[in-house]
Image (cartoon, grey):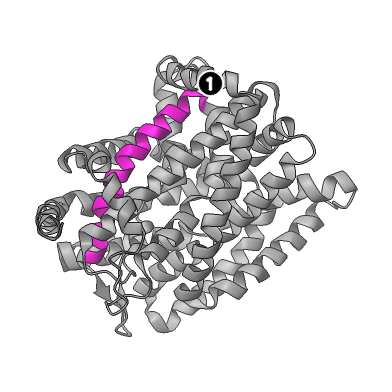
């Protein structure tokens, strides 16, 4: 079974996903008139909450929506995902992660604008957003099978098994093994159950509690991680230009990749970027669709900042630490353990504890937000009365993730992400002209106000 999951994931993430996510994203990037570059300043001013109106329909503010979406994206994809990318594709994979991020900003702009434009209501009358509602409300009932496909893949793919797996690995490596407190399998079970109980306290309080916790944790964790990495970069400051050049050069030669093919480097970079910033997967529209906003374009612009913060800023910081310390060439470690050895080499005695704290906050905040996404998909499929059963299923799988193998866990999540991307990208490209018209109208009105 594990072998089948790995093979399926490798097959679907080859050319099909590359064309859909990178190709589709590039079309949207050009069609938008390069909006990620032209309107970045306006997007940043919107996050200040200047235009928030608490009386509008929805459950949370736009800034809380961005915090919750970033809590889900700025996470272990940035720490262990970058390490996996460098391990498999060499430094050049990071360049293709950057390219994916810029086209991903356009994808997020369109998909999250649509999440406000085509909100639906669940069977309890609560306003809901997300690709399943965009498909049904925007494309019509005949497209409903696509909405169901997205929701089924979301229920299975938006589990916190990767986060549980990697957090278990870090806690064991840093806190338990060095002090002789690790008992192997038994320790994994204890850690898994502990994580499950912490997550239960937050997620059983619903989206308002999740968004509140995320909007407090996210700025803190990004700042902590940023400061730690900047300290390390100062230590190796003379080598930073060389490492940036290595990333660009290797992107077009593929010398460091397994098999040495540029195509393989591009696939690995795009795959890890999608896992990290989730542009085109359809998760962010679910949380942005719940924000108190009746301006689709405004919500799209705020959402667009997600891939920039996630991939261009945070992933690059991680990549530089791994490359500057040279651990990617001298160790057999994989995933989060590779990043851990880089931090330990750069800041002996302290680095591993700082990274462990970042991983702990990253992993938990992602676990909180993912539960909301999966709950939303379950609600769409089975109705609001049964939706809370999903939370109990979700909590149990955290324990399963803590004891499972990394390769199978990553491949299963990747495979489900790919299936979710198909309905999301089809609906986003199909309805893109609606967003284009709304964009022209919005900026025309903004001119009048300035």
Which stretch did the figure color magenta?
89-116
Q: Is residue 406 left or right of residue 74?
A: right
92 in the magenta segment: yes
Comparing 2 with 365, the one in front is 365
Picture mark count = 1
Q: Is residue 33 above or below residue 144?
A: above
Identity of the residue drawn at 56% across and 43% down: 226
Q: Is residue 359 left or right of residue 190?
A: left
Q: Quadrant of the C terminus?
A: bottom left
Image quadrant of residue 294?
Answer: bottom left
Check the image and name the residue furthest to the front.
Answer: 450
Q: Is residue 5 above or below residue 212?
A: above
Image quadrant of residue 25?
Answer: top left
Q: Main secondary structure of the magenta part?
A: helix
Q: Position of residue 362 (x, y in %)?
A: 58, 53
Q: Position of residue 409 (x, y in %)?
A: 57, 48
What is the crowding at mark 1: few (fewer than 14 residues within 10 Å), some, or many (at least 20)?
A: some
324 in the magenta segment: no
Q: Position of residue 375 (x, y in %)?
A: 44, 70
Identity of the residue drawn at 55% across and 32% down: 319
Q: Is residue 52 visible?
A: yes
Comparing 113 with 376, the one in front is 113
Q: Is residue 169 visible?
A: no
Identity of the residue drawn at 34% across and 32% down: 15
Residue beneath disc 1 = 243
Task: Say what secondary structure mark 1 lies in.
Answer: helix
Check the image and name the residue furthest to the right.
Answer: 180
Q: Is residue 101 left or right of residue 310?
A: left
Identity of the residue drawn at 71% across and 66% down: 193
Q: Position of residue 342 (x, y in %)?
A: 68, 32
Q: Is residue 174 left or right of residue 447?
A: right
Comparing 267 with 90, the one in front is 90
């Amino acid at each position: 079974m594990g072998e089948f999951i790995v093979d399926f994931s490798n097959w679907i993430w080859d050319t099909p996903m590359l064309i859909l996510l990178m190709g589709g994203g590039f079309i949207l990037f050009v069609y938008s008139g390069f909006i990620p570059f032209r309107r970045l300043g306006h997007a940043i001013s919107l996050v200040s909450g200047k235009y928030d109106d608490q009386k509008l329909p929805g459950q949370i503010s736009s800034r809380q929506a961005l915090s919750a979406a970033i809590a889900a994206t700025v996470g272990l994809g940035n720490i262990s995902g970058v390490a996996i990318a460098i391990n498999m594709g060499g430094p050049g994979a990071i360049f293709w992660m950057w390219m994916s991020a810029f086209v991903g900003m356009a994808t997020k702009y369109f998909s999250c604008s649509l999440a406000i434009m085509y909100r639906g209501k669940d069977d309890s009358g609560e306003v809901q957003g997300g690709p399943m509602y965009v498909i049904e409300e925007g494309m019509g009932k005949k497209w409903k099978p696509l909405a169901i496909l997205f929701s089924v893949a979301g229920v299975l793919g938006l589990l916190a098994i990767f986060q549980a797996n990697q957090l278990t690995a870090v806690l064991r490596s840093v806190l338990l093994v060095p002090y002789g407190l690790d008992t192997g399998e038994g320790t994994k079970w204890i850690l898994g159950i502990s994580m499950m109980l912490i997550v239960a306290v937050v997620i059983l309080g619903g989206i308002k509690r999740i968004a509140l916790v995320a909007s407090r944790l996210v700025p803190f964790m990004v700042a902590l991680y940023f400061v730690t990495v900047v300290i390390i970069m100062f230590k190796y400051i003379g080598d930073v230009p060389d490492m940036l050049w290595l990333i660009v050069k290797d992107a077009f030669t593929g010398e460091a990749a397994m098999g040495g093919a540029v195509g393989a480097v591009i696939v690995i970079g795009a795959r890890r970027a999608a896992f990290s910033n989730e542009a085109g997967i359809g998760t962010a529209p679910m949380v942005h669709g719940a924000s108190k906003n009746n301006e689709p374009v405004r919500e799209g612009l705020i959402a667009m900042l997600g891939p920039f913060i996630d991939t261009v800023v945070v992933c690059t910081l991680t990549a530089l630490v791994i490359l500057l310390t040279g651990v990617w060439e001298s160790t057999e470690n994989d995933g989060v353990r590779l990043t851990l050895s880089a931090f330990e080499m750069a800041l002996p005695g302290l680095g591993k504890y700082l990274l462990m704290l970042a991983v702990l906050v990253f992993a938990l905040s992602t676990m909180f937000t993912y539960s909301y996404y999966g709950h939303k998909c379950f609600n769409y499929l089975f109705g609001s009365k049964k939706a809370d059963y999903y939370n109990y299923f979700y909590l149990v799988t955290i324990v399963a993730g803590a004891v499972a193998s990394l390769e199978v866990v990553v491949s299963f999540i990747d495979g489900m992400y790919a299936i979710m991307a198909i309905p999301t990208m089809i609906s986003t490209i199909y309805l893109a002209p609606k967003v284009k018209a709304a964009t022209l109208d919005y900026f025309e009105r903004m001119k009048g106000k300035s």
